[in-house]
Amino acid sequence: MNPESAKKSRVVVGLSGGVDSSVAAYLLKQQGHEVVGLFMKNWEDDDTDEYCSSRRDFLDAASVADVLGIPIEVVNFSAEYKDRVFSHFLAEYRAGRTPNPDVLCNAEIKFKAFLDHATQLGADHIATGHYAQVRQIGDTFQLLKGEDGTKDQSYFLYRLNQQQLANAMFPVGHLYKREVRAIARELKLPNSAKKDSTGICFIGERPFREFLNRYLPREPGEIQTPDGKVIGQHIGLMYYTIGQRQGLGIGGTRDGGDEPWFVCGKDLTRNILVAVQGHDHSALLRSSLKAIDLTWISGQPPHCNWVYAAKTRYRQADAPCAISALTPDYCQVDFAQEQWAVTPGQSVVIYESKVCLGGGVIAGSVPD
């Protein structure tokens, strides 16, 4: 049975203190479910109000629970987060890649540690405020895009498996953000106007270089053009990502050009950051990529050489593509049009219309 249409059951909702999870809890209660709120604390290092707002978020979550008349529990997953998510996050940056912690956080914390804990509380399902949807066809659960295309979060959920989806509910997935805000205002929820979080999953919004420098030492080196001309100095390859424009410290007038500079590559062996001028420089465009650490939601891989769509970063428009060289551990994604700033460490997520099929971690681009 599709959990979205499940009969009255016990549902544990991840109350983050944000408006989306709050409205999700309200909708579930309106549907007749027994709703329990669960606030997850997953970061303890320098947990101050300046950057990591867990105390304020909990107060918001508790206030919402009080308004809705539901119980709320606090659980600390800090150890699990450090072991399963943050250690991987640092290892990827140390290797010169740019990881997406939200993807791993969803798979390992929100839909694993949280799910396990909720099951111990007697939950039939768990629910979050993600803008995504679940559909059951036969014995298979599908992950669908959220109805609000500007807020769709299926990209961050592509690593979920059948068991996780079977137990998941996304009550706001069929709504637009403006509708969620309107419900929150109508209910007079204390967080109805609270802005969306944009920081690192559970760590908060903070100066990123300063934060990363606490865990990874700086390793300065040269910034060069693809032909080897030295044009500046970098503070450490881990602080830069493909396509980055800001923070390079390079003026916009080199060789007579006034276009901005963009990171297009990293030479890890020689500790060199490679940059080019112009947003549409050929060095920033790729028609194919390699992906590893593959996850297919249905448990079955997609068909080779069929036309699908893919995103190589969140909020990117769907790009027509085909999959080739598919093995259990590796695949190649070939795009109909060149993609900008394909970034190792980020995820490529494959779609068939509104259905998220899964994806993998970008290992690099395929030379044109």
Image: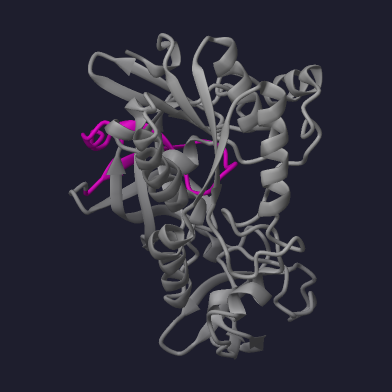
Which residue shows up at 70% across the image and 77% down it?
248
**Position of residue 360 measured from the top left corner of the image (x, y, whole percent):** 35, 50
Q: How many marks?
A: 0
What is the quadrant of residue 278 in the picture? bottom right
177 in magenta: no
What is the quadrant of residue 276 in the picture? bottom right
Name the foreground residue: 352 vs 153: 153
307 in magenta: yes
Name the foreground residue: 245 vs 189: 189
**Position of residue 162 measured from the top left corner of the image (x, y, whole percent):** 28, 31
Q: Is residue 275 above or below residue 189?
A: below
Q: Does 175 sit left or right of 92 as displayed? A: right
Name the foreground residue: 343 vs 104: 104
Q: Is residue 10 above or below residue 202?
A: above
Which residue shows up at 43% across the image and 24% down it?
353
For the N terminus, the image quarter is top left
**Position of residue 203 measured from the top left corner of the image (x, y, whole percent):** 61, 59
Q: Is residue 311 above or below residue 219?
A: above
Q: Does 282 sit left or right of 118 as displayed? A: right
Which residue shows up at 47% across the image and 64% down it?
86
Q: Which residues are magenta?
A: 297-325
Type of secondary structure dominating the magenta stretch = loop
For the C terminus, the image quarter is bottom left
**Position of residue 238 measured from the top left corner of the image (x, y, whole percent):** 54, 76
Can residue 59 be seen in this snapshot?
Answer: yes
Name the foreground residue: 107 vs 279: 107
Which residue shows up at 36% across the image and 60% down it?
366
